[in-house]
Amino acid sequence: MPGREEIETQQLGRLRALISEIRETNDFYRPRLEEAGFASSDPIESLADFAKRMPFTTKMDLVWDREEFPPYGSNLTYPLERYARYCQSSGTTSVPLPWLDTPESWSAMLECWQRVYEAAGVTATDVIFFAFSFGPFLGFWTAFDAATRRGNLAIPSGGLGSQARLQMMATNGATVLCCTPTYALRLGEVLAEQDPVELGEIPLKKIIVAGEPGGSIPEVRRRIEALWPGARVFDHHGMTEVGPVTYETPGKPLSLCVIEEAYFAEILDRETEQEVKPGERGELVLTTLTRTACPLLRYRTGDLVQKGWTDDADGKRRLTLEGGILGRVDEMVVIRGVNIYPTAIEKIIRGFPEVAEFQVTQTTRQSMAELEIAVEPIENLAPDAGGLEGRIGKALHNAFALRIPVRLVNPGSLPRFEFKSKRWVKRETSDD
């Protein structure tokens, strides 16, 4: 494929260097490499050869490894005294997993964030505001450290409420906001309630979102940008297990470009485990090429994506995820024979500007799953919201050919979230 040779040559060189580095010292991968026939000093022939022979790494492999070798597991390439950074996964799909990095591996992830900032058009004069709690989650810290490394004024706001954060943004002239899509919505709601004269101007130009698929959902983007006039949403995604993976493709707001210098990415059919064609959907599988301290080889991320290509300004053809992260394979539910992803529900509900927040309750009775959706209207449409329940119910029926109950709740009654949202509630019911 034109424009791919240089990228793939670099990937192969970094993969060979990675395998050489971890072959003898990483107790987690040594037996796996031996099983795949990569235990000798003979170089890997090609990326396709690696993908054919190397077994997958799964989330449960990592969970079991940490249970057997607590607290950090055996996926450590170097002696423990070389590690300087601790993070842990959010626990969205399993128990929180600790991750250790050396200064070198941490620096490699900061380089990936530099790509994110460059693609977003962040300049040296921008003031970047981080609306995070600054818990032990990798994304917050790498984004912050990368900003300070590039010379931007970086403002943390852990422990502050939304009003205090808005005041700090105005006082310091924040031009870039980093947060989850959910919190960008919440902070925008609080902004609308403030006295603009008392608060002062917030010269926000960009909102870099991550942590949830919402940044590549058109309806969510429009809602965020409506709440923040003059600011543009820029999407990005990553995982604690692997680091910062993608940035919004320049000129294609609903597409994420893989940072292929740092990752060998595969998009595989879940059943055949073969690479899908452009335009087809599959599971994203990642091999880290520069995070050698705690590498992952052919890691099944669980992210459902659609394969695409884009040509950058240098004429290189790069792998893209069209539509961003479409969902997670482990979050799909089957409702009366229909496959439904939470992102599909959100896309429909966020298409109604009258909705301030929503919550989906999934109940299971006699092994059958059912959904009910609670919708919170914006203040000025309460209490009946002009037939909002019926209109949302009709849109859901048109999309899924299912009748999903929708009920209105009082404004302000549903929870708000700073980190990843928890809008999907599961409840077990009796079989009586």
Image: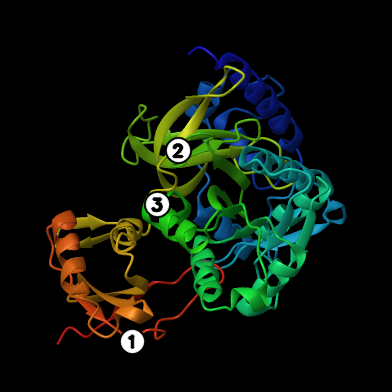
Q: Nearer the viewer, residue 275 or 28?
A: 275
In which quadrant of the rendered view does residue 432 lie? bottom left
Residue wearing tag 2: 321
Please indicate whether residue 83 sits to the left or right of residue 310 in the image: right
Q: Around disc 3, counting alpha carbons within 10 Å, would you say few (fewer than 14), some (14 to 19), or many (20 or more)?
A: many
Is 53 placed left or right of 175 in the picture? left
CA gap between label 1 and label 3 equals: 26 Å
> Quarter of the image holding residue 132?
bottom right
Q: Which mark is residue 217?
A: 3
Q: Which residue is mark 1?
A: 410
User: Does dot 2 land on a helix, a strand or a loop?
Assistant: strand
In the rendering, at what x and y percent does residue 284 appear?
46, 41
In the picture as drawn, the residue positioned furthest to the front comes out as 197
Relative height, residue 337 to residue 297 (above, below) = below
Kindly identify the amino acid type of the residue bearing the numbered disc 1: Asn
**Mark whose residue sits in front, 1 or 3:** 1
What amino acid does circle 3 point to? Ile
Could you tell me which secondary element the residue under label 3 belongs to?
A: loop
Q: Of marks 1 and 2, which one's residue comes earlier in the chain?
A: 2
Q: Position of residue 59 (x, y in %)?
A: 51, 54
- Percent position of residue 238, x then y: 58, 49
